[in-house]
Image: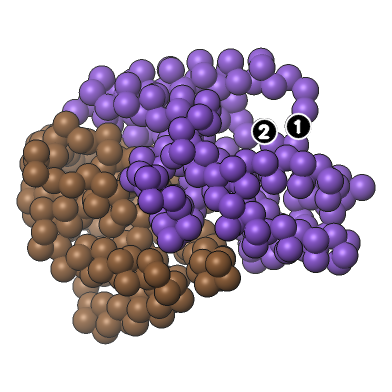
Chain colours: A brown, B purple
Amino acid sequence: MQPVIDFILELEKLKAVSRKVRPLGLDRYENSAEHSWQLAMLALSLAHYAGPDIDLNRVTRMLLVHDVGEIDTGDTMVFVEGGWEQRKAAELAAAQRIFGMLPEQGAGFLELWQEFELGETAEARFAHAVDRAMPVLLNLNNNGQSWRENGISYERVVGRVAPPIKAGCPALWNYLEARLEEARERGLFGA
Amino acid sequence: MQPVIDFILELEKLKAVSRKVRPLGLDRYENSAEHSWQLAMLALSLAHYAGPDIDLNRVTRMLLVHDVGEIDTGDTMVFVEGGWEQRKAAELAAAQRIFGMLPEQGAGFLELWQEFELGETAEARFAHAVDRAMPVLLNLNNNGQSWRENGISYERVVGRVAPPIKAGCPALWNYLEARLEEARERGLFGA
């Protein structure tokens, strides 16, 4: 039992990993633990829009573990362009360290984490769509807060989020495409 | 799609529901969204200790939704004794309101929420054990912070958490029983 306890207390640290988006109505940044919860809820809420072959339980587990590597590396905005490979290597080492604490279930968690990273299965693609859509939804409803704070343009947002959301959940992209166009007209983006 | 979006933005509010426990090493209280994530992770990490008939995917979904009613009612410590029935009625009304926002998946979420509340299935009992154990684990590793801040005695903690943890995950209770006894000797409890 002790390894399970050590692992769950190690996961505490994800509550301290700060993201760039603020929860609606709150004067602080979102942390990666509450973000992971919300992604799991969004995936389950979108069941009607997932393909019939998608295993939503697997998607849910993937989303619950996908950010755990950030305990060692911190969160990086998807719009950051340099140092991608180095960062990915550091996140893998982190995932191996943390999931390695857990004798029985650790290997399965690491497998889910890697499946998400590779993004090749239908489940991973759906999970990616959900992960990319959530901060967009928050920004759309918060005057483009993290786009404006970080100088992210409409073109960069669309360039970075359209392909994965289209690939993983086309109906979600149809919805967001129109909202992003409205947001552009309202001037919600950075430089 | 719009009802799904309205629902997931309504769930934002769970990030603002403050609990009585502080995350380890952080100078703030835990919120119910990050708590829900951690419970799902603890349940999955305890797979080895769940009975073979327990559907852990169902447990996970149950834990993800179990606190959503707090969006309207706030969190109440399990040690609060008065007003139980009134609080439960308010939480049910809240769950009905919030899950009612979601045409396709809302009924399933409400069913999971009610299954947790009733605590009668093996999955609900396992979920309860996990929900009761997590704040105990945090207190054991944080000098009894919420027990001392709220004047909760060793007897009240054990009286309130032992039965559900024993019923849902006996191995977890075996572990905690010994740790709680040590904590008593170290004076980690309130009056």
Along the viewing direction, whichever of B81 and A138 lies nearer the viewer: B81
The image's mark for residue B76 is 2
Question: SS class of the residue under badge 2?
Answer: loop
In which quarter of the view is residue B75 placed? top right
Q: How many marks?
A: 2
A15 relative to B151 in the view: left or right:
left
Q: Which residue is mark 1?
A: B80
Q: Residue at x 32, y 72 (%)?
A: A107
**For this rendering, which residue is in front, B46 or B152?**
B46
Q: Residue at x 76, y 47 (%)?
A: B158
Q: Residues within 10 Å of mark 2 (few under 14, many from 20)?
A: some
Image: B99 above or below B67? above
On what subunit does the disc labeled 1 rest?
A: B
Frontmost residue, A132 versus B43: B43
- Height in image: B159 above or below A67? above
Pick the quarter of the image with the N terminus of chain A.
Answer: bottom right
Residues at circles 1 and 2 in contact by the CB criterion of under 8 Å: yes
Q: Mark 1 falls on what kind of element?
A: loop
Q: Give amino acid for label 2.
A: Thr
Residue B97 horizontal side relative to residue A83, left or right: right
